[in-house]
Image (cartoon, grey):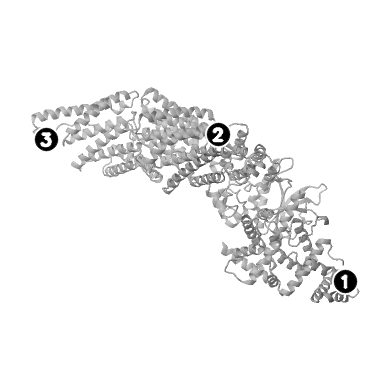
Amino acid sequence: MVDSSAAQITRLLHDWRSGDREALDRLIPLVYDELRVIASRHMAREWRGAIQTTALVNEAYMKLAGQRDVDWQNRAHFFAIAARVMRRILLDDARRRMRDKRGGDMPTIAIEDLSVSAPDAPVDAVDLIAIDRALRELERLDADQARIVELRFFGGMTVEETGEVLGISPATVKREWALAKGWLHRMLTTGTGSPI
Amino acid sequence: MTSEQWQRVKAIVFEAQARDPASRAAFVAKACSGDEALHREVSSLLESIELARDRYETPAFDARDAGPLLHSVIAGGQHDASVDIIGQRIGPYEIQRELGRGGMGAVYLAARADSEFRHEVALKIIKRGMDTDAIVRRFRTERQILADFKHPNIARLLDGGTTSDGLPYLVMEYVQGQPITAYCDERRLGIDGRLAIFRQICAAVAYAHQNLVVHRDIKPSNVLVSSDGEPKLLDFGLAKILGSDEGVHETETVHRWMTPGFASPEQLRGDRVTTVSDVYSMGVLLYELLCGRRPFSQFETEGVGLVRAVCEEEPEKPSVAAACDALDSISALRGMSPERLLKTLRGDLDNIVLKALDKEPSRRYAGAGEFSEDIRRLLAGLPVSARPDTLTYIAAKFVRRHKAAVVAAAAMAVTLVSATVITGAQAGIARRERANAERRFKEVRQVANAFLFDFHDAIAALPGSTPAREMVVKKAQEYLNGLAEEAGTDRELLSELSTAYLKLGDVQGRPSASRTGDTDGALASYSQSLALRRRLTAADPGNVTFQQDVAIALVRIGRILEVRGDPKGAIERAREAMDITQRLVARAPSAELRRDAFRAPLYLGDALFGTGDYDGALTMFQKALEVAETARLDPPEADFKHRIAVARERLGIMFMVRGDPVHALDSFREALSNEEAMSASAPDNADYVGLVANGYYYTGDALGGLHQYAEALAAENHALALYEGLLRADPKNAAPRKDIGGCTQKMAEILLAEGEHASAARVLERTIAIRRELAGHDKGNMEYLDDLADSLMLSGESLLAGHDPGRAIAVLDEARAIREPIVASRPHQAVYGRGLARLYSDLGDASAALAAKPANGHQAIDRWRNARQRYQQSLDLWVDLRQRHALWANEAGKPEETARKIAICDRELGSG
């Protein structure tokens, strides 16, 4: 069973790298289930400790793609998908928690609700929803940059890995990342995309 | 802002960052050259970059509080990679917002776009990857049935179709509410309240089942309760629409598809799914409502481990599952104290839930209606139908019981000693010796004739003759022993003597004809007979009659040994007898030999059964039936019906052992009809009456196994009336008394199953009294003692169920005192071992129940220790039985079940 899905994953990753966008659609469900299972197991065991995104995704990768496949490129792309999936997982959770608080309707985030978190403070539901919203704004403006945010913030990928997936140099990644963060932060704190 | 503008902004920002801080501002001003807005943008961005430098570096997942994510991750559904569709139109509906995600896809709130009145529906879009065509096809088939569903507690399926993306969608009644588990927890609903809501759901499920629709995916998220307390079942019939075609069982799909923990064993295995599969899922739901956990949660929450557990492990009782670390919060969510919660769950509620969770579909409630009814009885304070294993078939007991009467051919005429004329060979004896010999021979003949005339089987079969026999037995014994010493080598004499001993043994304790119970004496007499006959075959090896005689004696001895608790010896004898008779009947069949050839495998089967070799026993009984059929001549032999009845009855017993009461009932009924025919043709024959009584007894037992309690009791009452009649006719006879004990025991079991505690208790008292008396009289008879222990155990179990563990322990201890020595001296006999294993388990339960009562800490510790000790003893026995492959179908999980009880004790002792 591992074999067939490993082959499947590898093939899909390959297809996606070659530009087949459909492959992404098919990959995500497979990855989603696996991540879900692994994450829940991690949670159950260490549920007061810190869980590393990379460890989680790595485990999922080992499981799905098979240990034989140590192709760097495939792994990096897998992580890229995982990033998108993680984003979805986190957002689903955040929305659920917000809904529970407010009893049903999906909330619109008012500025007063935003809390400007201290550096590295736990990110809570409100933050996540806001970040996601902002990220979608950024996507309209600059898709590549938004992708970097997704890969790094949701996927826990390194600068090198991010560069590999997007086909840009680490220096570029760093630069873009810094700017994206700045843009996001401004968006979150002032509620505006830009003065222009 | 446009993209180009943004690119420009970026370029300036990056360039500015490359410069040192001092010259940065100047650069920016120059680069923006007059564009105020641009300048503002770049400046603010640069500032924000600084502010955000150390932020967002920790990935979101790592930084979060892990707790809440756990729930979302586990409950989270499939991602369908679809673009946000809120606001879009699907068919005539407009999507308003997402309601949730599930295994099939996402559900949205939608409203008809073309309608005046705002009519809200739930629109479920099925995820990509499921076979669209097949789904749409099946939907069309099912739609008519499902659309016609009208029940206040079932959400209706309204419409369906395909989106422009090619995804199938279903439109359902929009139900606002919480999953039933959350609803109950939030309101701290007590057990009564939860049961009330659950019963409403039962009604809905029953309605659907009447319309031949199985839900297949009952789980909390499919049972929503609105704020006014009305529960509604969602997704009825969807499982069928969305499931794969029949016959295609892709494990991956199945497991991904089903909700872990709610799917029944047969669903997980891919077997037929029926209405009772829904009953199972409802059982899981009730389980969670009652104790806050799911069955088998201690194995895994999903995946292969859970599947295995559902199919193979026995679930913990809800009362036990609740008694975990989280007991305080579990009971708080039910608005009661921990003690009260456990008390409420224990007993009937536990049993009701477990019945619904039975791995064998036919043993669950037959439908949601029955399920609900049992709960109603509980709430009304009436007894329930679900019982712990008191109806477990203790078949060996019945075989033992009825070795007495079930054995073939009570009326078989043993080869009667015919007058043998002293041959001339003896002419050479001296006159004095001849006179002596003549005298002796006459005496033997007298005794033999005495048996002939006074104790011919036909006469012996009449009721009331037992006291006469006692007298004769005594006299005959003395005389025959004297003769045997002087028998010398006179073969005829020896032969007649051996027969006389055999007949004597018959009277003393042959467990077929009406008798006093003296198995010791019988064994001695039979052994004498055998010894003589072996001498004869040694002296005249070609003599067929002598060999036949040996076989006959062997069979007699085997039977007695079994009754006395020595099945190995019995097996030995029976095998040898079978070898002999087979050889003889093959060579030159006769009526007599056919009869013996029938008995031999029968007895061997009995003996094998006693050691737990059920397969061997079954083979032997089938063989006996075959041989019996050979007597179906025209006209059939005299006791043909009798043999058939006996063989059928044995087979029926084997079916019960295998947990197949349906076939057992067939066999027993056929046996009974044969027996009634026999009795009808010979109404004064007490043994035949006994056979008919047995037939009713067994029939009642199989009916009880099928939960047809009224019919079962009727049959048992019929049997009881017959036994009592026999006892009245011959008050000193042990056999009917024993049979009455067994019959009343069975009635007590049935009454308990029906919840008639008071009646059952009365009947049990009588049973125990009878069995005590019997055991007191015939101390060599293991059956009597074991029977007594059985009744005591049943009494103990019912006391335990009635929450009186103190008295239960007293009664169970008495049973233990009886059983322990038996098992110690006969470790190879499965029937005794299993009885003791159950007994230890019961004692453990009683101790545990006592420990849970308020008491000082010391007492509680002692009781837990005691319970643990008993459970360990039980476990040892179960494990032994398993290794010997002597576990019955419904005992397969006993070792694990017991191990878990031990774990609970350990926990109590650890925290104490």
Provide the chain ID for the residue under circle 2: B
Disc 1 residue type (three-letter): His
Pick the quarter of the image with the N terminus of chain B: bottom right
Which residue in the protein does label 1 denote? Answer: B39
Label 1 sits on a secondary structure element that is helix
In screen coordinates, is B642 left or right of B538?
A: right
Q: How far apart are marks 2 and 1 (CA)?
A: 84 Å
Label 2 sits on a secondary structure element that is loop
Mark found first going from the N terminus, 3 or 1:
1
Disc 3 residue type (three-letter): Ala
Residue closer to the observer: B699 or B517: B517
Q: Can residue B894 be seen in this view?
A: yes
Q: Give the crowd class for mark 1: few <14, some 14-19, many >=20 residues within 10 Å.
A: many
Residue drawn at 75 percent across, 59 percent down: A128
Q: Distance between the residues labelled 3 and 1?
A: 146 Å
Residue drawn at 83 percent across, 64 percent down: A193
Q: Can residue B250 be seen in this view?
A: no
Q: Are marks 3 and 2 on the same chain?
A: yes
> Residue B432: where, in percent of width, then height?
9, 28
Which residue in the protein does label 2 denote? Answer: B803
Q: Distance between the residues labelled 3 and 2?
A: 80 Å
Which residue in the protein does label 3 denote? Answer: B425
Q: Give the crowd class for mark 3: few <14, some 14-19, many >=20 residues within 10 Å.
A: few
Question: In this rendering, is residue B467 above or below B53?
Answer: above
